Structures are given as structure tokens and as C-alpha cells.
Amino acid sequence: MRIDEDRAERALVIAPVGRLDSVSSSELERRVVERIEGGARQLVVDLAGVEYISSAGLRVLLMAAKKLKDPPAALVLCGLGPAVRGVLELAGFLPLFAIEPARAEALARLGYERPC
Amino acid sequence: MALETRRLSVPGSDEGVREALDALAALLAGHGLSKAVSWPVEVSLDEVLANVVRHGLAGRAGAQVDVEVRLDTAARPPGCELVVSDDGPAFDPLAMAEPDTTLGVEERPIGGLGIALVRRLMDAVEYERRDGRNRLLMRRRLVALEGEDNA
């Protein structure tokens, strides 16, 4: 798995590429924790490059949501393909997150407009 | 015969899990099966192996997990059967309580979801303890998950 990053003003986009399985998810976990502890308060997780996600990956998303809840901050997920959406749905995760189709909409939701 | 059986024995470690997932992905892709239909099986193998490696074998030196994949590409839709077995302490993952998947972010415990996902993703899951080994059999017809529009 590879993890790409992109910044749009104060928002940080984290885009894992590959499969979010029980082995690779710990890399994403380290990166997300590092960025949140480093002060990221507006986070977009772009899952467009993710082949599939297992419960270990769900755990990282939930951890990020919990960490960004107090004090309130923003987490938006985007780029959910059928495999990722399917697992989030089966796990009852869809209502827990702000979800947008793609990165541009996710950033717009955080108040940033930029050409894409 | 369009029935292919692949057996592999991997170390009970993260490297072993990765090796087994790579082998399954390569086998399914090699038969022209797209991610749209193969991902539920790949996710399920990851969940089961993660459980066995982290809990059942718990870092025991030299521990191995056996994975058998049976692929029936003549069937319409194709069928896939996975058997994961290990010689760790007896543990029936299907005996665990189903987690509540309706709780909010605050109340939701982190973890405990893996086997629930396997039950929901596979058509059949059976556990047995035989000859001092845990044996979990999973079966799924390789079709896109219900509700998905792309096959």
C-alpha cells in the first residue's frame, strides 16, 4: 500500500492506494495519528485508490472519527468504490461519516473551492 | 475439469497473511475474475487469517496456517471455497456474539467486526475442530454484492 497526501489550505487529504487489509492498515493508522497529533483538524480521506477494506481499515476510520470529535473537527470520506462502500454498509458505518463522491466535493464540504 | 485447488501453508505472521492474500488475488485474477466479484472473498480471508494469527497462534514461533482455495470456474456464477486451518487452541469464531452495527461513533467499540463481516460476505461459513485443528470453511458464489450495480 502507498499513502498519498495533498494539502488544500488548512485541509489535509490522505489517500491510501492499494488494499486496506489487516497488515497494511497499521501504516494508515500511524500516518493518520501522526497528522492529527501534528495539528490536522480538517481531514479528507480519499479512498478512490483502495481495492478493498477489511475491518482493520474500518478500525482506522473509526479511530480517526473519535479523535476528531473532541474538540470538534472535520473528517470527510470520499472516493468510495463498490468494495469499500459495501463493507462500510455491512458494518453500519455509512451513517457515522460525512461522505462525498470525490475529492472536490469533499473539499467543498469543508469550505474550500478549487478547480479540479 | 474447471475445478482448481490451491493449497498453501504460510507462517502465522503478518508476512504470512500478506503472502496468502497475494496468492488468492493472483489466483482469482488469473482466472479473469474481476475485483468486483472477488473482493468479498479476499476481505473474508484477511479477516479470518488476522484472527488466527493475532489471537489463535499469538506469535508462537514457527506456527503455520494452512489455506486451501477451491475454485469452480465451470459453475455459473463461479464458486469459491476457502478452508483455513491451524493447530492453535480450539476456537470457534462463529460462537462470538454479533456486534451491534447500529451504534454511533462514541458508543462504537473499536474492533470485533471482522467475523461479522465474514458472515455477511460469504454464503456459508462452517467451523469444526478436527484432529486437534481449527478448520473454518467459507463458501461464496462469485457475484457482485447484492445492491451493487456493477458486476
Image (cartoon, coloured by chain):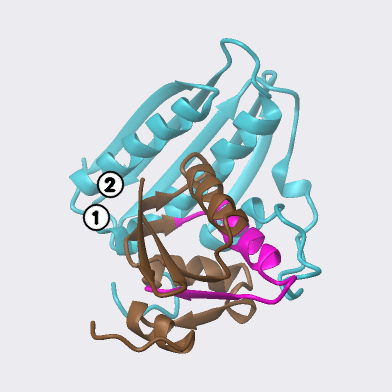
Both labels 2 and 1 in a single chain: yes
**In the foreground, B138 or A99:** A99
Q: Image height check: is A116 above or below B57?
A: below
SS under mark 1: loop
Q: Which residues are magenta?
A: A53-79
Q: Position of residue B24 (x, y in %)?
A: 35, 40
Q: Image height check: is A51 above or below A79?
A: above
Q: Quarter of the image for the N terminus of chain B: give it.
A: top left
Measure the C-alpha gap from mark 2 to mark 1: 5 Å
Q: Position of residue B46 (x, y in %)?
A: 50, 43
Q: Is residue A49 visible?
A: yes
Residue at mark 2: B28
The quadrant where residue A94 appears: bottom right
- Dot 2 amino acid type: Leu
Q: Position of residue B50 (x, y in %)?
A: 58, 38
Q: Is residue A45 visible?
A: no
Rate crowding at label 1 as few (under 14), some (14 to 19) or many (20 or more) other CA atoms within 10 Å. some
Q: Residue at the location (71% across, 72% down)?
A: A69
Tell me the cyan chain.
Answer: B
The quadrant where residue B36 appears: bottom left
Q: Residue at the location (59% across, 50% down)?
A: B125
Q: Chain of mark 1?
A: B
Rate crowding at label 2 as few (under 14), some (14 to 19) or many (20 or more) other CA atoms within 10 Å. many
Q: Chain of mark 2?
A: B
Tell me the brown chain.
Answer: A
Residue at mark 1: B33
The quadrant where residue B64 appears: top right
- Dot 1 amino acid type: Leu
**In the foreground, A17 or B103:** A17
| Magenta-drawn stretch contains A62 | yes
Question: Do callouts 2 and 1 mark residues in contact (Cβ within 8 Å)?
Answer: yes
